[in-house]
Amino acid sequence: MPVSLSDLPESPESVGAALREAAYLADDSTALISFLAQRLGKPVLVEGPAGVGKTELAKALSRSTGRELVRLQCYEGLDEAKALYEWNYRKQLLQIQASAAIHGEDEDTAPAMGEIFTEDFLLERPLMRAIANPDPVVLLIDEIDKTDQEFEAMLLELLSDFQITIPEMGRIEARTHPIVILTSNNSRELTEALKRRCLYLWLDYPSAEREIEIIRLHAPEIDQALAGRLVEIVDMVRELDLKKPPSIAESIDWARTLILMGADDIDGKVFRESLSIIIKHRTDLDLVAERIGPRLGRSRTVSGNGAANGSGGGETDDGQATGDPD
Ligand SMILES: Nc1ncnc2c1ncn2[C@@H]1O[C@H](COP(=O)(O)OP(=O)(O)OP(=O)(O)O)[C@@H](O)[C@H]1O
Ligand SMILES: [Mg+2]
């Protein structure tokens, strides 16, 4: 049964607003693709660096539409049995034994194959659950790039026709139309066949204004000026050639850390003490400490937030950060 028209969103703006209500701040293209996914009934492939909100988008769509989230976490070696369905061999064996006990060992009276290959003997895995669910769901296929191409090929039928074929039972069609979100960190190129079936959304690090807003959404206690300073520094750090640049998740953690530290500015000392919250590789730590640390000075008065904190003794700027670190 398709989703009724009244359940479908009216415009990209209304999707953006609903996502915001669900604590997800979407930019225009994210709102547009999320809208199209529902109106065109197509899966969305979301790619982008780590920690930019790919997984969270699916969760937020689930919250904003009131649909259950069915999640398939992909990993190397993931196969159909874990993703789609598995026969419940234990239950099948018990059925055979029970039948043998009643009818004797005679092979002719053993249960027919058709009797033990029915829905009752099926263990539903996430893809099957999304298809068979009587209510429409959001299906998140997370980190699809971790699987191999054979697994992708298996997904094609599901993604284009919203159906699954079980050899012993035949075709199972979706009862409702799920919103499907696939995410990838781009660790390998996905097949053209998969991409053709999906709408594409590239999520990148957000603009400074949006990142400040996201940080304040997750850490409301943080002062606007301090959040601005934090984003300015994170931006400088991202420009360096790092193994793992800080993501939105790290910005949020850093904001929460600064609040707990009682810092109302990020001077050299605060930066050094909290650096490991945003940088998680030994070599990156050295590079960032060397390139960014000296630019922050000893203290800096935060506009609109009174005097600087005690750690810098109330001194004013001293070689503070500007523009491009290079
Ligand atoms: N637009 C946004 N609005 C609100 N919160 C966001 C937004 N983008 C990211 N976040 C927050 O950032 C964090 C990281 O997001 P998420 O886990 O979705 O990243 P990801 O892109 O899936 O990363 P990975 O590739 O590592 O899985 C989450 O805590 C999420 O709440
Ligand atoms: Mg993710």
Image: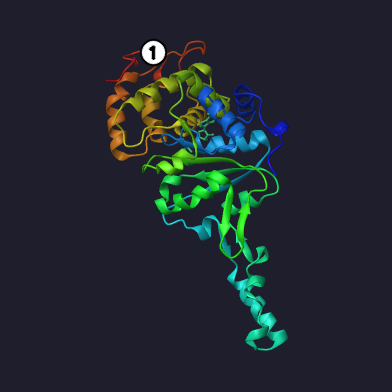
For label 1, the SS is loop
**Residue 163 x %, y %:** 59, 50
Residue 266 % position (x, y): 42, 22
Quadrant in the rendering for residue 40? top right
Residue type, numbered disc 1 = Glu
Viewer-proximal residue among 219 and 147? 147
Residue at image location 47% in from the left, 58% down from the top: 79
Looking at the image, which is closer to me, 13 or 249? 13
The residue singled out by tag 1 in the image is 315
Q: Which quarter of the rendering shows the C terminus? A: top left
Name the one closer to the observer, 183 or 63.
183
Report whether 294 appears left or right of 15: left
Horizontal side, residue 158 vs residue 318: left or right: right
Horizontal and vertical percent position of residue 74: 47, 50
For label 1, count other residues whose C-alpha is less than 10 Å away and answer few (under 14), some (14-19) or many (20+). Answer: some
Q: How many marks?
A: 1
Between residues 242 and 19, which one lies in front from this camera angle? 19
| Residue plotted at (55% across, 56% down) | 84
Question: In the rendered view, would you say 15 is above or below 178?
Answer: above
Q: Is residue 148 visible to the viewer in this orientation of the structure?
A: no
Residue 47 can be seen, yes or no: yes
> Is residue 169 positioned above or below 57 on the image?
below
Q: Is residue 205 above or below residue 45?
A: above
**Which residue appears at 30% of the width and 20% of the height?**
325
